[in-house]
Image: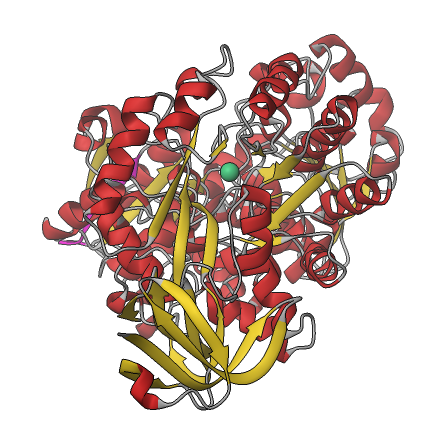
């Protein structure tokens, strides 16, 4: 199968076959990262711009390492260092990046839909590295890769996603992606963090975390933005930890081999108790490792690398 | 010697619906009768197959002069109005500077005089600077030519100020038009709250943002006995509240805009900023409620909320895009669609687009001997495609570009002077 998409914008626009191809490619990319010399010449001469309108050291670093392992030239542009702060529009900025012959623009933006605005206007491939509260496809794909690796597949798994669903692009992309691959999803959190109509993405909804954890194969905890207290979406962190946080006692009803995931960075003791974050069920560091592999796969595939079906 | 319009179907709600001739002299209607000889006028217009109605009034437009002439001027706005068949418009006060004093009102009227004859009725601000803190000088504004008061674009948050505004304005015979929005509940919402917003990851605006304030204003109208006019109704809950208030005899009136009875929130999919507005496009259920409200008289008026914006304010991230669409050049065919679909009769549509706004604003209207000759001639069969590039408005922000529509104003007459549309 050939990968024919110019852009990676969200999980909705990827087919089951495309998702499988990305995950298979990522598996092979991971092998490169385990070699003593972690570098292949595959994308030599390609220019990748990491355009981060909103700060995110983790995701940016992960894409940067991915680009370097494929021998691409990557440059980082952040909002504070660019002309955006001087009043240039997003479209102007993107056209300028393209004029510098960027082959791929990896972008992070605080507005939902920002990469969708640019994609049809530029020749460069756009990879969405997170837009507002809409989508974070590379995070969903690395989560899927991690689960597939540990469980051997995704079909029929029970996946619980817990926390601030309303403000989470990670939750939206994971619900759409896992659902597409045949998993059952249950979303849990206080009603103030549950957006209207989220069921339409194909998830069950509960406000009871014990119900969500019950029989789960995978538990994904979401990061709580502490400043949400201003929007009255939570009372205190203490109460949140007590009613919606994951701890050992709560985990007892999950499957014995349950995986605990978190997109990071963790608020220890709030979303997850200290012992669980570092415990045997936690695959949080595998997620980080797989993040590089998935991003290598995405960079490789959007520039047409899938055509010869060979990763190196 | 004047103008003779022959063989048109005259639709003047509550007055007549028949094929007849109209003779116009000295800006006034001189005679209405079948078979007026062509020798009676120097200009004869054959209106066979056309519909002749009292000049359309759009009681809610934003012309951006003074302050943002790159979006619209009074002159370009008047040209767009004439193209759409409107002989009169009411301009909202959120200009820069705000129309909260007699100087700005006079400036607008002066500019309008230099335009194409479309009657411009300035709506002045309820509160100084639209800040919701102090009343403007309603007496002076009335003398300068203001026809009504509104802080449109912003809600009057203080119930106390709203009550006093109703009472004080009533003393000068100025009606109040209310922009109903609970901005705290709206938060940073960018579109209708619901499944579509959740999928798109956009913060939502629930229906109650509007109806909470509609219900408050109804309560203030009930308290004072003074009429209040609700602008741009978009939700089922608002329609229900207004219907109920009217049943109880409270003097509330309301308008909606063509986009609320034509489109739903689906129009913003793909982050289409040309369908971004405030209040936002709602669900199919709300759209049906608005249509029912028009059909049973709960909603009195169709107004466009014509809101021109520059392309640079629309070709941006959805949450950062300006709210509003242009409406003057597409309002009539979208209204005629309601007639085609049986929601309104032709007379019912003309009531919403001419007779009722005139009644609310205290204007003389109707095709009667002795009245000013303000007339719109409509070709109900003209099929055409909306093309934003041909708009006379300075701005192009419309979700209707490329739509095939039926019906068009072909001629409009203001005080006896005619303009082709
Ligand atoms: Zn308004």
In the rendered image, the residue lying farthest to the left is A100
Compared across the picture, whether B139 is left or right of A20 comes to left
- Say above or below: A154 vs B165: below
Q: Residue at x 42, y 75 (%)?
A: B377
Q: Is residue B73 visible?
A: no
**Image quadrant in which the N terminus of chain B is located:** bottom left
Indicate the position of residue B212 as horizontal and vertical percent values: 72, 31
Query: Camera-side residue: B275 or B37?
Result: B37
Residue at image location 29% in from the left, 69% down from the top: B418
Please tell me whether residue B112 is drawn above or below residue A223 in the rendered image.
below
Nearer to the camera, B320 or A21: B320
Query: Residue A48 colored magenta?
Result: yes
x, y percent for residue B210: 65, 36
Does residue A165 appear to the left or right of B367 in the view shown?
right
x 82%, y 19%: residue: A243
Question: How many numbered marks are there?
Answer: 0
Q: Is residue B201 magenta?
A: no
| Residue name at image x 22 percent, y 26 percent | A85
- Taking the image as shown, residue A303 lies to the left or right of residue A245, namely left
Question: What is the quadrant of residue A285 in the picture?
Answer: top right
Q: Main secondary structure of the magenta part?
A: strand
Span of residues in magenta? A44-52
Left or right of B21? Residue B317 is left
Q: Quadrant of the C terminus of chain B?
A: bottom left
């Amino acid at each position: 199968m050939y990968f024919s998409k110019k852009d990676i914008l969200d999980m909705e626009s990827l087919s089951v076959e495309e998702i499988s191809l990305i995950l298979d490619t990522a598996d092979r990319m991971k092998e490169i990262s385990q070699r003593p010399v972690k570098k292949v010449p595959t994308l030599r001469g390609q220019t990748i711009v990491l355009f981060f309108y909103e700060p995110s050291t983790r995701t940016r670093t992960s894409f940067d390492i991915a680009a370097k392992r494929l021998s691409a030239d990557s440059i980082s542009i952040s909002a504070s260092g660019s002309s955006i702060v001087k009043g240039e529009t997003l479209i102007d900025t993107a056209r300028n990046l393209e004029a510098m012959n960027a082959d791929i623009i990896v972008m992070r933006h605080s507005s939902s839909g920002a990469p969708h605005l640019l994609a049809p206007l530029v020749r460069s491939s756009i990879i969405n590295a997170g837009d507002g509260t809409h989508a974070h496809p590379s995070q969903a794909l690395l989560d899927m890769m991690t689960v597939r690796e540990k469980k051997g597949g995704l079909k029929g798994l029970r996946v619980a996603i817990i926390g601030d669903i309303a403000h989470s692009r990670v939750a939206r992309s994971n619900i759409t992606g896992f659902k597409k691959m045949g998993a059952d999803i249950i979303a849990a959190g206080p009603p103030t963090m549950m957006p209207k109509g989220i069921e339409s993405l194909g998830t069950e909804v509960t406000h009871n975390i014990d119900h969500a954890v019950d029989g789960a194969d995978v538990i994904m905890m979401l990061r709580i933005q502490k400043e949400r207290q201003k929007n009255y979406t939570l009372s205190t962190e203490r109460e949140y930890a007590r009613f919606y946080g994951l701890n050992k006692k709560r985990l007892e009803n999950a499957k014995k081999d349950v995986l605990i995931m978190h997109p990071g960075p963790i608020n220890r003791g709030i979303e997850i108790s200290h012992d669980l974050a570092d415990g045997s069920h936690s695959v949080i560091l595998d997620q980080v490792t797989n993040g590089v592999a998935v991003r290598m796969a995405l960079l490789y595939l959007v520039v047409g690398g899938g055509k010869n079906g060979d990763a190196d | 010697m004047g103008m003779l319009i022959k063989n048109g179907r005259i639709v003047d709600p509550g007055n007549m619906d028949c094929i007849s001739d109209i003779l116009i002299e000295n800006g006034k209607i001189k005679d209405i009768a079948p078979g007026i000889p062509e020798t009676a006028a120097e200009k004869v217009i054959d209106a066979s197959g056309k519909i002749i109605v009292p000049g359309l009034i759009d009681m809610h437009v934003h012309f951006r002069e003074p302050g943002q002439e790159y979006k619209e001027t009074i002159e370009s706005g008047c040209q767009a109005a004439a193209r759409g068949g409107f002989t009169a418009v009411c301009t909202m006060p959120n200009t820069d500077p705000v129309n909260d004093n007699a100087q700005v009102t006079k400036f607008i009227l002066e500019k309008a005089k230099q335009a194409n004859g479309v009657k411009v009725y300035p709506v002045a601000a309820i509160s100084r600077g639209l800040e919701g803190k102090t009343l403007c000088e309603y007496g002076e504004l009335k003398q300068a030519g203001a026809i009504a008061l509104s802080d449109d674009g912003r809600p009057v948050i203080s119930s106390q100020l709203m009550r006093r505004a109703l009472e004080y304005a009533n003393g000068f015979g100025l009606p109040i038009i209310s922009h109903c929005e609970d901005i705290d509940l709206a938060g940073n919402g960018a579109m209708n709250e619901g499944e579509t917003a959740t999928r798109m990851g956009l913060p939502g605006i629930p229906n109650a943002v509007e109806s909470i304030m509609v219900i408050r204003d109804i309560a203030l109208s009930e308290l004072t006995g003074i009429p209040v006019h609700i602008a741009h109704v978009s939700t089922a809950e608002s329609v229900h509240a207004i219907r109920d208030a009217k049943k109880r005899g409270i003097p509330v009136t309301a308008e909606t805009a063509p986009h609320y009875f034509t489109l739903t929130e689906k129009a913003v999919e793909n982050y289409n900023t040309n369908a971004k507005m405030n209040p936002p496009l709602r669900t199919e259920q709300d759209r049906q409620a608005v249509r029912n409200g028009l059909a049973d008289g709960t909603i009195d008026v169709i107004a466009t909320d014509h809101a021109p914006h520059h392309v640079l304010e629309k070709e941006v991230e959805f949450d950062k895009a300006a709210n509003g669409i242009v409406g003057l050049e597409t309002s009539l065919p979208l209204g005629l669609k309601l007639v085609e679909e049986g929601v309104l009769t032709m007379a019912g549509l003309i009531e919403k687009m001419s007779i009722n706004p005139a009644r609310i604003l205290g204007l003389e209207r109707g095709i009667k001997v002795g009245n000013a000759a303000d007339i719109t001639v409509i070709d109900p069969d003209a099929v055409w495609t909306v093309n934003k590039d041909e708009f006379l408005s300075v701005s192009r922000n419309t979700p209707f570009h490329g739509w095939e529509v039926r019906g068009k104003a072909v001629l409009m007459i203001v005080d006896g002077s005619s303009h082709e549309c």
